[in-house]
């Protein structure tokens, strides 16, 4: 075994920048962590974005003697391309070449605590903060040059190459100016930003920073991370959440080749070996033990029946004066549902930890490294300032999969083995068996049209478990509930609107009279659940946009015209018109039994990006198989920092939503989950990708950033169901919308 690497050696080898003045650690520790919950403490409410919590410029930007900038963000690169977009923002507002800007992402020892990287908040929070901080720094550099030259600052400009220049031709580099610049100052509100008409970097397509290593086999993910002297670990658990192994022969496992240590702490157990395969072999030996279910039996009824039988805390989301109640009299009514969904992470969760000289360092693909830093500290009995968490990309994300638990698992092991880097990766069946699932949901909608053909009453009722159980203390981890002195499990809480969780997007953006929206929040969870991309917006938008389609068809109105007749927001109207114009909606193929078209719209959370989708499908009536021929999307995300990044996000959202909507559902019986691999939980394959996907990003020069990462999930699901209804006349409401269900509904050919 190689000599263990010290933390100091690791930091040196990793060329990490640590000589950096930050906000006091105690301030960061005040931050909350839940999506939509209490974020970092607001200390400057007049400033935009995350500057509200970290108003000092030095928290975001440093200029070195060469005039190069280092920019810090608390948001993490999850494969969504945010590192590229923020890099473009910083380069643009500093007016530097992108090559002169280094971006440091979520690292609890270096970057501001911006809470979770979730909820499509990164551009709105961090992008806005960086843009304004950079504009402040550029202003200070310009003023400094003006003082040197005895000129009005308004007579100076920057040249895009790291220089301040005067009208008479004088020129001085940022490096020379930065030496006399104090960035330990608060940002000023309203500092002029660069004119969008002069953008050199922002709003242009640039190569993604995170792609090259991924496509060339380079080190991209935490799963790839290797360190001198590193040992490999596997955590030992029953087959799925709510089960425990019995009578495991740890003595025999410890004698297997390569096994270095069996770590046990209460019910928590892990094997540590020289090689990964040796750790797996020991785990397999232990998994031969019998197991029992310790949690209550899982439900055997449908998702809707299961949820409606649970005790609820009722929350009125919206009431515009109509009589309270779940349904409107007469008109149309319908129920919709989706099952429990897996994150479907291609790479099982993984984390690396090193405990050395009283300090724990964790490399994690968690979306909340600051929560890991605080909650793991509690778990292993260290002060938070002695735990550093560095975000490292993982091959699988978009919500709370097993990444947080893997970080806690490896920390417990590393604490027992000081000075040795430990790499722990979950097995495929552990990812499916133990990760928190995207909650199952059910809705009931009812609406009535008035004599003018417009909606006169609207009712929407949703049943859902909490969508955010991310660990903010040690009790949120599996390991936290397994150690000898266990921590109490957290109690699920709803995320209040306007963000919402199960009720997210249940309040329509449409201008409707007499609306009543009710959320049955269900704190009891028959399965372990937490955040999955878009939270409740997936089913709520599916339900709303399906009902709109039904109302339009039942009244003989065109689905696009019907929506426009109920929409007053000009930006919402613009994306609907743009998507359908490019789709050639007026001349689209009409439903003929096999081919049909549908559309749908939503503004994510009614706060983020606007997205309209038009879709053409072809149904094979003999098998029920649906092929998606065309998808045209129009997106308004405010000022696009990285148009290509927005297109990537929306394209990915379309493909992911189609997979959720058409085939994904976690299987289980009363004893536990039964989906443990890709045969038991199929996801879309490359052959299932639509023939043609086009995403058109509206320019919106100078407008505030709007999060676009989760804007497509709901509209895609609804457009798919609406297109099937157009093609076949069959309305599908309960996900997954599988070929078997459609073939059964079509009946004999």
Image (cartoon, rainbow, N blue to C red):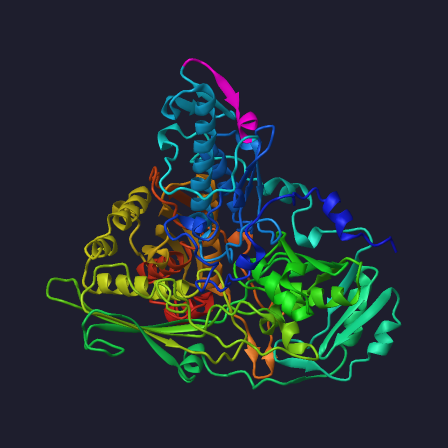
Q: Is residue 461 visible?
A: yes
The picture quadrant where one finds residue 308 is bottom left
Image-based side of 406 in relation to 563, left or right: right
Horizontal and vertical percent position of residue 117: 51, 55
The span picked out in magenta is 168-178
Q: In the image, what residue occupies the spot 53% across and 54% down?
A: 113
Horizontal and vertical percent position of residue 460: 29, 71
Given residues 634 and 241, the one toward you in this image is 241
The picture quadrant where one finds residue 452 is bottom left
Q: In the image, what residue occupies the spot 51% across and 69% down?
A: 530
In the rendered view of the protein, which quadrant contains the C terminus? bottom left
Q: In the image, what residue occupies the spot 61% across and 58% down?
A: 346
When the figure is inspected, residue 116 is found, relative to residue 151, above or below; the finding is below
In the rendered view of the protein, which quadrant contains the N terminus? bottom right
Within the magenta stretch, is there residue 365?
no
The picture quadrant where one finds residue 400 is bottom right
Horizontal and vertical percent position of residue 98: 53, 32
Image-based side of 117 in relation to 190, left or right: right
How many dots with numbers?
Answer: 0
Image-based side of 270 in relation to 299, left or right: right
Image-based side of 216 in relation to 50, left or right: right
Q: Is residue 677 visible?
A: no
Given residues 107 and 63, the one toward you in this image is 63
Q: In the image, what residue occupies the spot 39% across and 28% down?
A: 198
Within the magenta stretch, is there residue 174?
yes
Horizontal and vertical percent position of residue 494: 42, 71
Q: Residue furthest top?
A: 168
When the figure is inspected, residue 674 is found, relative to residue 542, above or below; the finding is below
């Amino acid at each position: 075994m190689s000599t263990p690497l010290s933390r100091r050696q690791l930091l040196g080898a990793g060329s990490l920048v640590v000589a950096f003045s930050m906000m006091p650690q105690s301030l960061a520790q005040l931050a909350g962590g839940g999506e939509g919950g209490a974020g970092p403490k607001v200390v400057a409410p007049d400033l935009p974005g995350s500057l509200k919590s970290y108003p000092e410029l030095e928290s975001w930007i440093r200029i070195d003697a060469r005039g190069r900038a280092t920019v810090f963000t608390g948001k993490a690169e999850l494969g969504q391309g945010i590192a590229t977009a923020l890099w473009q923002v910083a380069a643009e507002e500093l007016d530097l070449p992108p090559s002169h800007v280094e971006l440091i992402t979520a690292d609890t020892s270096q970057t501001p605590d911006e809470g979770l990287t979730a909820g499509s908040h990164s551009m709105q929070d961090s992008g806005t903060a960086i843009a304004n901080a950079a504009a402040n720094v550029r202003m200070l550099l310009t003023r400094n040059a003006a003082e040197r030259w005895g000129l009005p600052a308004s007579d100076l400009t920057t040249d895009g190459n790291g220089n301040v220049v005067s009208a008479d031709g004088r020129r001085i580099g940022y490096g020379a100016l930065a030496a006399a610049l104090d960035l330990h100052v608060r940002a000023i509100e309203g500092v002029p930003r660069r004119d969008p008409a002069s953008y050199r970097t922002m709003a242009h397509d640039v190569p993604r920073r995170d792609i090259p290593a991924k496509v060339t086999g380079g080190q991209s993910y935490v799963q790839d991370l290797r360190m001198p002297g590193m040992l490999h670990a596997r955590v030992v658990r029953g087959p799925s959440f709510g089960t425990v192994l019995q009578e495991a022969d740890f003595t025999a496992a410890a004698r297997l080749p390569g096994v270095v240590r069996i770590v046990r702490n209460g019910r928590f157990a892990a094997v540590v070996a020289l090689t990964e395969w040796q750790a797996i072999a020991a785990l397999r030996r232990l998994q031969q033990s019998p197991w029992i279910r310790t949690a209550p039996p899982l439900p055997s009824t449908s998702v809707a029946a299961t949820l409606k039988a649970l005790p609820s805390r009722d929350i009125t989301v919206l009431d515009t004066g109509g009589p309270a109640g779940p349904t409107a009299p007469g008109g149309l009514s319908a129920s919709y549902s989706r099952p429990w969904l897996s994150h479907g992470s291609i790479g099982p969760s993984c984390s690396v930890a090193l405990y050395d000289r009283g300090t724990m360092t964790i490399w994690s693909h968690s979306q909340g490294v600051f929560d890991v830093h605080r909650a793991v500290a509690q778990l292993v009995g260290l002060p938070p300032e002695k735990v550093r968490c560095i975000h490292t990309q993982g091959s699988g994300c978009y919500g709370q999969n097993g990444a947080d638990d893997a970080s806690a698992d490896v920390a417990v092991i590393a604490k027992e083995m000081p000075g040795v880097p430990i790499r722990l990766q979950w097995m495929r069946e552990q990812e499916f068996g133990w990760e928190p699932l995207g909650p199952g949901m059910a809705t009931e909608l009812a609406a009535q049209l008035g004599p003018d053909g417009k909606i006169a009453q609207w009712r929407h009722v949703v049943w859902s478990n909490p969508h955010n159980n991310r660990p903010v203390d040690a009790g949120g981890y599996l390991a936290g509930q397994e150690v000898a002195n266990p921590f109490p499990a957290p109690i699920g809480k709803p995320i209040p609107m306007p963000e919402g969780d199960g009720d997210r997007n249940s309040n329509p953006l449409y201008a409707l009279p007499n609306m009543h929206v009710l959320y049955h929040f269900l704190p009891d969870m028959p399965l372990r659940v937490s955040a999955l991309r878009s939270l409740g917006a997936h089913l709520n938008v599916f339900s709303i946009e399906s009902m709109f389609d039904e109302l339009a068809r039942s009244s003989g109105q065109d689905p696009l015209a019907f929506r426009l007749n109920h929409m007053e927001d000009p930006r919402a109207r613009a994306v609907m018109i743009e998507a359908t114009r490019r789709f050639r909606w007026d001349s689209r193929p009409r439903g003929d039994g096999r081919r049909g078209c549908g559309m749908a719209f939503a503004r994510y959370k009614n706060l983020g990006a606007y997205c309209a989708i038009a879709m053409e499908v072809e149904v094979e009536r003999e098998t029920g198989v649906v092929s998606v021929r065309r998808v045209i999307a129009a997106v308004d995300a405010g000022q696009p920092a990285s148009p290509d990044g927005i297109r990537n996000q929306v394209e990915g959202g379309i493909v992911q939503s189609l997979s959720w909507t058409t085939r994904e559902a976690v299987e289980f019986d009363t004893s536990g989950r039964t989906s443990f691999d890709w045969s038991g939980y199929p996801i879309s394959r490359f052959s299932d990708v639509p023939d043609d996907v086009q995403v058109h990003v509206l320019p919106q020069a100078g407008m505030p950033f709007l999060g676009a990462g989760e804007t497509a999930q709901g509209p895609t699901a609804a457009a798919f169901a609406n297109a099937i209804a157009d093609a076949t006349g069959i309305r599908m409401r309960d996900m997954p919308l599988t070929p078997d269900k459609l073939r059964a509904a079509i009946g004999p050919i």
